[in-house]
Amino acid sequence: MLDNEIWPDDLVAEAGIPVHDVPLVTVGGGIGSFVLVDYLRIAGAPTADIRVLSNIDHPWQTYEYLTRVSQIPGPERIRSDSSSRPDNIWGFPSYALSEAWRERTLRPLAHVLGEPIFADYWTPRVGDVFKSMARESARIGYPKMLVKGVARMVRRRAGGGYFTVLTPPAATGPTKRVAYRSRFVHLAVGYPGLRFLPDLQEFREKYGDFTRVVNAYESHEHVYEALRTRPGTVMVRGGGIVASRVLQRLMDDRERYGLQTKIVHIFRTFVTGAHGPHLWSRRKGGDGWAYQGFNYPKSVWGGQLKAKMRRLDGAERAAEYKRMGGTNTPKRRRWQQQMRDGRDGGWYEASQGIVERVEPAADGTLVSLVAGDAGTRKVGADYIIDCTGLEADIAEHRVLADLLAHGGAGRNPLGRLEVERHFEVKGTASGDGALYATGAATLGGYFPGVDTFLGLQIGALEIADDLARRGFGRRIGPVRSTAQWVRWAFGRPVREG
């Protein structure tokens, strides 16, 4: 079977793999799957026509873990617009309006009206995001559609459609694998995993030290606990949103507990001021950071940049991504003041450099050899926190790698999955069936903001409309949209049909 790119029904039957028939399968089970299912259910698709194949229990589980370990616990706010609601396809009421109503205060609304000139961008508390998704999950019957297991591959079916192979949890069935035969497949599998910089990976493998050299996206609370018991030096590497959150946690703990923690911050690219190709395309910056309220300029979600990107292909599209992309973080007043205090007090030092190697010193500390304009210098620290991001190579994911090798999929100008404007994966059509993908795996396509709440919603809307064109479900017209919003507002279950 592995050698055949197109599977006849009898080939699967001969392999003794049980087959379940369902019109649409979504693989991943995270927020990307949840948003598409939400659209389809609101459009009238019954739960019997959809299956979610996932190894997690609820759509926000992975995101909740990542936000928690990267220092964004429930009461803290995430980098998301007020109207970008995965649980609410209409975006009304916004998170700010909901919070104002719930807490009987006008402060969130006044904050939104004053952003970004008189106040930082207003963003929702991550705990509120999870609660609202839990409410919508129950309303649309999401648990009824969830099938637990690990998705192994998606192969085209002879005659049209696809087989999606799933390994169920151990001891839950008579066979090690089951297959779902469907006309449509949607992939929303997120990032393949953690990404360590080569020098840090080499250190961990060579010395077996997984406690002092850590990734910000893995559990590393022990670092902060250790610093509360004795003074220490932490090296933070990276210049994005996660680096700023880790930095604020270190500074908050220093202030709250009267600690003597020292912070050495290494930027690969040190930004000294506003930058960009021309006056109308500039990003604020300074002290090493590139500042931007959201991942991309807001016009990529519904303005000039969105329209422009839909017209670009190949090298032109890659060049536009390079021009408007890059690591950045919101500029928050609180940690800006904390950094100033740290520089004045001599306990926070930021510089540009490329770390060539990390090795243990005789006194038990970690020594990083940092190459810069003035040559190579040695920088010591008790802990290193890598904030450079998640694994980006789609070939590291089992399902995506198989799709590239046997499913007809190709890479876009940034190396991710190449998708059409309606998010169908190019080259994977099978008869009257279609395979779609949304989320981080499609970054580099015709729509830039794919790995955001609003980006996942835009992708889901494009897919839902294309599915309706193909006869699966219906478009959400003004009458149904209004009626369904009323049901959403009162928490009533989705009415099928």
Image (spheres, rainbow, N blue to C red):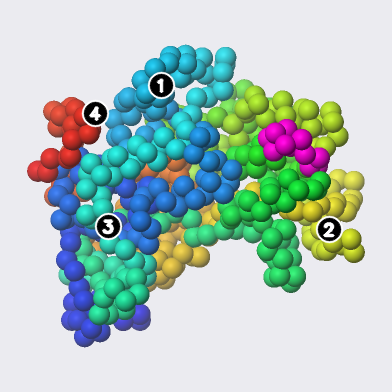
Specify which label sits upstream in the sequence, 2 or 3.
3
Dot in front, 1 or 3: 1
Residue 177, image x and y in percent?
30, 76
Specify which label sits upstream in the sequence, 3 or 4.
3
Left or right: 257 as drawn, with respect to 157:
right
Q: Which mark is residue 146?
A: 3
Specify which label sits upstream in the sequence, 1 or 2.
1
Q: From mark 4 to mark 2, how far is it between C-alphas?
A: 56 Å
Q: From mark 1 to mark 3, how far is it between C-alphas?
A: 34 Å
Give the residues drawn in magenta, as a range: 251-262
Residue at the image position 44 percent from the left and 38 percent from the top: 127
Q: Quadrant of residue 399?
A: bottom left
Residue denoted by label 1: 103
Q: Which mark is residue 365?
A: 2
Q: From mark 1 to mark 4, how far is it between C-alphas?
A: 18 Å
Which of 295/45 is in front?
45
Amino acid type for the residue under numbered disc 1:
Glu
Residue count near mark 2 (Cα–Cα under 10 Å), binned few <14, some 14–19, many ≥20: some
Specify which label sits upstream in the sequence, 1 or 4.
1
Contact between marks 2 and 3 (CB within 8 A): the answer is: no
Specify which label sits upstream in the sequence, 4 or 2.
2
Residue 261 painted magenta? yes
Residue denoted by label 4: 489
Amino acid type for the residue under numbered disc 3:
Leu
